[in-house]
Image: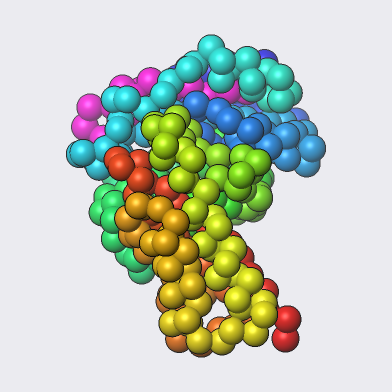
Amino acid sequence: MKIIRTIRALQLWRARQSSRNVHLGFVPTMGAFHAGHQSLMQRARRSCGTVVVSIFVNPLQFGPTEDLDEYPRPRQTDLALCRQAGVDVVFVPSRKDFYPPGFQTSVTVGVLTRPWEGAHRRTHFQGVTTVVAKLLNLVKPHRAFLGQKDYQQCCILNQMVTDLGQGVNMVMCPTIRESDGLALSSRNGYLSSSARRTAPVLYQALNMGASSIREGETSIKRIETVMQAHIRKTSNAKIDYLAVCHTETLEPLNHTRKKMVLLGAVRLGKVRLIDNVIVNTPV
Ligand code: PAF
């Protein structure tokens, strides 16, 4: 496995690949790997001839009161997991190399970035699109693999590659969960033991909403009430949002449709959990 630490070295490596007709798969990450990241790498490994993973804790996507400095950086363990997953190249740039002094370009996607996570983390998505646009320009992959857990991020990055004609096939891979349903996240380690016991309520609520739809409930208000009531009855989690949305525009729906996504975010102490469930109606 090759470890590349600078943009220049990555550009040289990528230029050499152009003559080798490789099918290149890319997994952008911030490190602190869990089984969710491993499943993205494995999926890339199965479907692409060459797999590149980036590990970069992107300062642009953290708000001023967020956990940039505390964000876990177990670099040696992460590299070992990449090796185990059969990754070919790991790109680990320094902050200074990736955003050199004078860096002043940003990539902004429009309406998709405004609701839900965008409303709670004002500058977050611009940070994500800026870093991913630059990574895609450098790596020039054929396919990029992202986790469904960050559903809004997947939609926004899809929109970005379409709008910018980046020609990358964005592959959304299933959320990997603990046995009690909690979606894996590098931030789950921040949960206190009592918050950890409570944390599955979000996925439970989303599943209750999905079940009510499958059983024929058509009132969006009642579906949302089912989800909210479960969280309020069984936990002290604070609800940021629980909504029934269009799977592509992410607009909140007034009526149920054939396919919908239930999006949710709650706060347990200082930890924010997000999750989602895609639901297809029987008709
Ligand atoms: O999902 C993440 O880990 C990050 O937002 C990403 C896509 C690697 C960009 O920094």
Image quadrant occupied by the N terminus = top right
Which residue is drawn at the image coordinates 39% and 62% (left, top)?
A: 232
Residue 88 seen in render = no
Q: For this view, does 171 lie left or right of residue 243? A: right
Report if residue 99 lies within the magenta region.
yes
Please tell me which residue is depicted at 29% across the width and 25% down the height of the picture: 69
| Rendered-image quadrant of the C terminus | bottom right
Residue 242 is drawn in which quadrant? bottom left
Q: Is residue 108 toward the left or the right of residue 258 in the image?
A: left
Pick the front one: 17 or 258: 258
Drawn side of residue 9 relative to residue 2, left or right: left
The percent position of residue 23, horizontal first and vertical second, equals 74, 39
| Residue 136 in view in this figure | yes
Q: Is residue 229 magenta?
A: no
* Image location of residue 88, percent across then percent down: 68, 23
As drawn, which residue projects farthest toward the front? 233
- For the point 58% across and 73% down, the residue is 260
Range of residues picked out in magenta: 88-103
Whether residue 242 is situated above or below residue 146 in the rendered picture: below
